[in-house]
Amino acid sequence: MLLDDYLEPIDISSIAERNQFNENNWGPHINFYKGGELDYTSYQIAIIGVKEGRNSIFNKDSSKAPDEIRREFYHLYRNVGKCQIIDLGNVKLSEHIKDTYFALATVVFELKKNNVFTVILGGGNDIIYGQYMAYQELHEMINVTCIDERIDMKNTSPKIVHSESYLMPIFMHQPNYLFNYNHLGYQTYLCDPNELDTLDSLNFDSYRLGHIRDDISETEPTLRISDIMSVDVSAIKHSDAPGNANGSPNGLTSEEICQIFRYAGYSDRLSSIGIYELNPSFDTQNMTAKLVAQCLWYFVEGFMNRRVENPQSNDKDFLKYTVEFEDVDHQLVFWKSKRTDRWWMEMPYGDKDHFRRNQLIPCSYNDYLKACKEELPDRWMKAYNKMF
């Protein structure tokens, strides 16, 4: 498929002349799409800009963010060796925003089909709708993780998509291939209780900012089972990321969001990341663009250290733990990797074969400890309720 119909290659001189880069910066080692056929086997990561801010509430200048992030990232020093990255340029915009979603979905699907990871630089938060639509053609159950201070469910209509209402169109889309939705970093005083009740009634997972800050490592199992991750810059505290019109004095710190991006890189299932709502008009000395660039740096580092692990009973690299429940005829099976210390728990999927992909649920050591006290882990309960 020719990508020219959907993408506009960028002029690298608009970001920085190549002679302004040090030879060890990322810039000289990024390939830039110039049109025509693309040899997907030559690349591991593709960067796409979406200069679309028309549906971003109070933050329309987020359309200016992609080049600012590029400028900062390409000047960082390389942290890994042979990581082949291509910058595909920006999605072509048209009169109707739905066409932007369609164009993005088409490109992301093509990249996913050819095993190329996609990094999307937005643009408004509503662009995640196009990111999600790319996965519909795969016809398999997928998991989505959003990092946001708010739950963007301001309208329950499946037809209204903007930066504060994109969730219901995703939840209600038919055919529905969404197995689980994870919301990380919400701040309770910014969320309508009805929104939290809706997530709970759908057996989706939501984690308060305080829960994440207590133990950042608890986000790793969530990202390990996710196919899509999206990040609203407003989830980061305003003092660390001032480039957003809807920021809050509280939020994730710069160190915490970088750690989350590293976990995202480690995830061998995750195949696209979207970074949204960065507004250069509100930024101070490009601090937010610099932080996002550093997040990408940590992501690449994690990506190049990915280990595909699949627990099996005959695999000597894993330990199997069976937890018996005395009061009920039930047991939970856990697996632990000897190489990485990562944990999984087994899920039944009965005769519903389309759930097979989620039979092994990534979990944490804390989930195992909870089971040892004869308490069913929340991750297990919510997954079970969706399957049966």
Image (cartoon, rainbow, N blue to C red):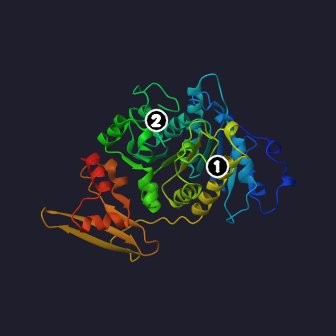
Which of 172 and 20 lies nearest the eye of the viewer? 20
Q: Which mark is residue 152?
A: 2
**Residue lying at 43% horizontally and 53% vertically, measured from the top left:** 210
> Judging from the image, what secondary structure is the residue with disc 2 in?
loop
Name the image quarter holding the N terminus.
Answer: top right
Amino acid of disc 2: Asp
Give the mark, 1 or 2, whose residue is nearer the N terminus: 1
Residue 202 seen in render: yes
On the picture, is 28 further left or further right than 50? Answer: right
**Label 1 packing within 10 angstroms: few (<14), some (14-19), many (20+):** many
**Label 2 packing within 10 angstroms: few (<14), some (14-19), many (20+):** some
On the picture, is 181 further left or further right than 28? Answer: left
> Judging from the image, what secondary structure is the residue with disc 1 in?
strand
At which x and y percent is residue 340?
A: 46, 71
Q: Quadrant of residue 20?
A: bottom right
Which of 254 and 372 lies nearest the eye of the viewer? 254
Q: From what the image shows, is residue 42 above or below residue 341? A: above
Mark 1 highlights which residue?
Answer: 46
At which x and y percent is residue 192?
A: 39, 35
**Residue lying at 75% horizontally and 57% vertically, measured from the top left:** 29
At which x and y percent is residue 314?
A: 34, 74
In the picture as drawn, the residue positioned furthest to the top comes out as 95
Q: Nearer the viewer, mark 1 or mark 2?
A: 2
Q: Quadrant of residue 92?
A: top right
Residue 32 seen in render: no
Q: From what the image shows, is residue 37 above or below residue 169? A: below
At which x and y percent is residue 55?
A: 57, 28
Q: Quadrant of residue 336?
A: bottom left
In the picture as drawn, the residue positioned furthest to the bottom comes out as 316
